[in-house]
Amino acid sequence: LALHASPFTLHENMFELIKADYARYRPEGFRGRIYLWLFNFDWHQVIAYRWCSFLNRHRWRTTARFFGYWSRIYFGSDISWKARIGPGLYISHGVNIVIGSGARVGRNLTILNGVTLGQKRRIEDWKGEQNEDGYPEIGDDAYLGTGCKILGGIKVGRNVTIGANAVVTKDVPDDVIAAGVPARILREREASTRQESLSREVAKAPRNDRAL
């Protein structure tokens, strides 16, 4: 399985990453922007991750660890500053999210509460690195539903939706929806199919010329 995550350098500009993340939230108007910067818990978590990741990449690791520690306490999530997440990160209801240090994610990730991206080794093996089984790699435009777990050194392709509470331990190809325990492919996600479906729904919709 080829992973189609867009490459981005380890030293990509933090402000460019935040700019791409900001575009995903799309606040409307002046009041919307004020609310986002002052009161949006999820957006603050995105900024905290970018800041800690920036510090780690530039070898301010003790400072990254300090901010990362308090970030975990404040947000109630454990997103490692060593994880690589591409531009366009969108967190929704961001509580109890766990992203391990070796996770690699492409652009435009949407992640909901309770998601875990980590290893699948046993607790008794944590002290020994000989049983290291790797972290997941996830392609562009992924949607990770509430409570899903993606475990081990697997690859999840581009434009994939993982359903709520799914447990994924095997590779997932591009353009599919997967759910269940263990996760299985339910159906494909094709842009052309979605567009045709939308066109049919619009055509069936009753016409009403009266202004609302």
Image (cartoon, rainbow, N blue to C red):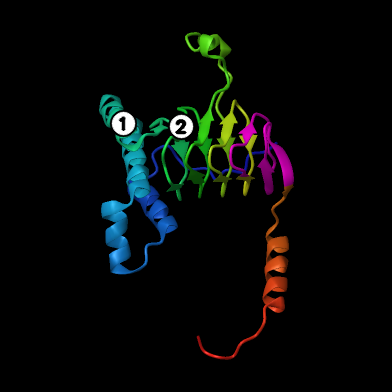
Q: Is residue 185 magenta?
A: yes
Against 173, residue 68 (above or below) is above
Q: Main secondary structure of the magenta part?
A: loop
**Label 1 with label 2: CB-CB less than 8 Å:** no
Residue at 65% of width from left, 29% of height from top? 169
* Percent of width and height locating residue 122: 56, 14
Residue at 30% of width from left, 26% of height from top? 65
Q: Amino acid at mark 1?
A: Ile
Along the line of sight, which residue is nearer the eye, 13 or 200? 200
Residue at 27% of width from left, 60% of height from top? 34
- Displayed quadrant of residue 139: top right
Along the line of sight, which residue is nearer the eye, 52 or 194? 194
* Percent of width and height locating residue 107: 51, 47
- Looking at the image, residue 174 sits to the left or right of residue 79; the answer is right
Q: CA distance from mark 1 to mark 2?
A: 13 Å
Q: Amino acid at mark 2?
A: Val
Q: Quadrant of the N terminus?
A: top right
Against 93, residue 34 (above or below) is below
What span is colored magenta in the figure? 162-186
**Mark 2, residue position:** 98
SS of the residue at dot 2?
strand
Q: Is residue 32 magenta?
A: no
- Displayed quadrant of residue 165: top right
**Mark 1, residue position:** 73
Crowding at dot 1, Cα within 10 Å, few <14 / some 14-19 / many 20+, comes out as: few
